[in-house]
Amino acid sequence: MFEDATLVDLSIGIEDGAVSEPDPASIDRMDHREGAEWLAENLQALGRDVTADDFPDGTALAWEEVHAITHTATHMDAPYHYGTESEGDPARTIDEVPLSWGCGEAVVLDVRHLESGAEIGVDDLREALDDLGHELSAGEIVLLQTGADELWGAPEYLTGFPGMGRAATRWLVDRGVRVIGTDAYGFDKPFDEMGRRFEETGDAEELWPAHLAGRDGEYCQIEKMANLDSLPRKTNVPLVAFPIVVEDASAGWVRPVAVFEGGAA
């Protein structure tokens, strides 16, 4: 089916102890010998006379145990992440998000000219769309290219990006956009910048304004995307981004992939 397709992976994976994560995942690995010992112990508990040495070469199956929050690596935030209600109804958890939201055509909006800590406004979105000669349509997926993914693997990844504001988020959602992605660590501005603005103004709306806009207009966001510069075009990008189902969760890991059938033309 995809023999002639060009596939572009737009994700960052779960890594052990990644310095670009404020809550790094840990991965405990069981090698093939340890797997044989564990499986033999399970069989012995069932009354079977099997030891690790009975497996071919004394080895069996390897596996890993991952300790990570659902907001590790590339993930999709559900409306429930932003609050208990969205648009006056109970906010959907990640297992309640319609699959149809995670597939369709995407447009990439280039905001790499904005400085770290800047707030992405409506005018910035309009300018990026004008540069592409593109008009948004309901159900389209919007991807923000900040260039921050180039910092992955360094502590600066947590601070080196512009973030969305409330007005810009509402502007997209009001036009029927249900999924908005970013190649940055967070959808809002960096933590310290939001804290600075709050201290300066005392305005609670300076704290996670883009996230909390989801209480008034239902949408999902994909954070920590990557490789948007590898896409052969910025409009009409066929995208598949289905989140892992985690019961009653605020987010789920996702691997967004752009699929260009018949090549990248």
Image: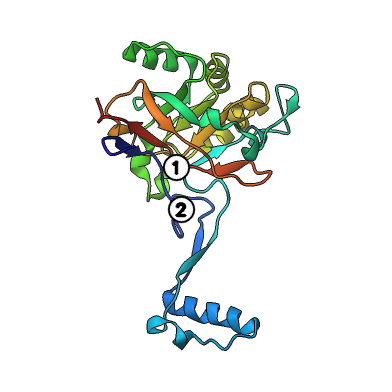
Q: Is residue 150 above or below residue 146?
A: below
Viewer-closest of 221 and 240: 240
User: Looking at numbered disc 1 in the image, what kind of residue is underneath it?
Assistant: Arg
User: Looking at numbered disc 2 in the image, what kind of residue is underneath it?
Assistant: Ile
Q: Which residue is mark 1?
A: 255
Q: Nearer the viewer, mark 2 or mark 1?
A: 1
Q: Is residue 8 above or below residue 105?
A: below
Q: Is residue 41 above or below residue 187?
A: below
* Image mark for residue 14: 2
Quadrant of the rendering where the C terminus is positioned: top left
Q: Quadrant of residue 40?
A: bottom right
Q: Is residue 56 left or right of residue 179?
A: left
- SS for tag 1? loop
> Residue 27's spot in the image, x, y percent?
49, 63
- SS for tag 2? loop
What colour-coding does the image apply?
A: rainbow
Q: Earlier in the sequence, mark 2 or mark 1?
A: 2
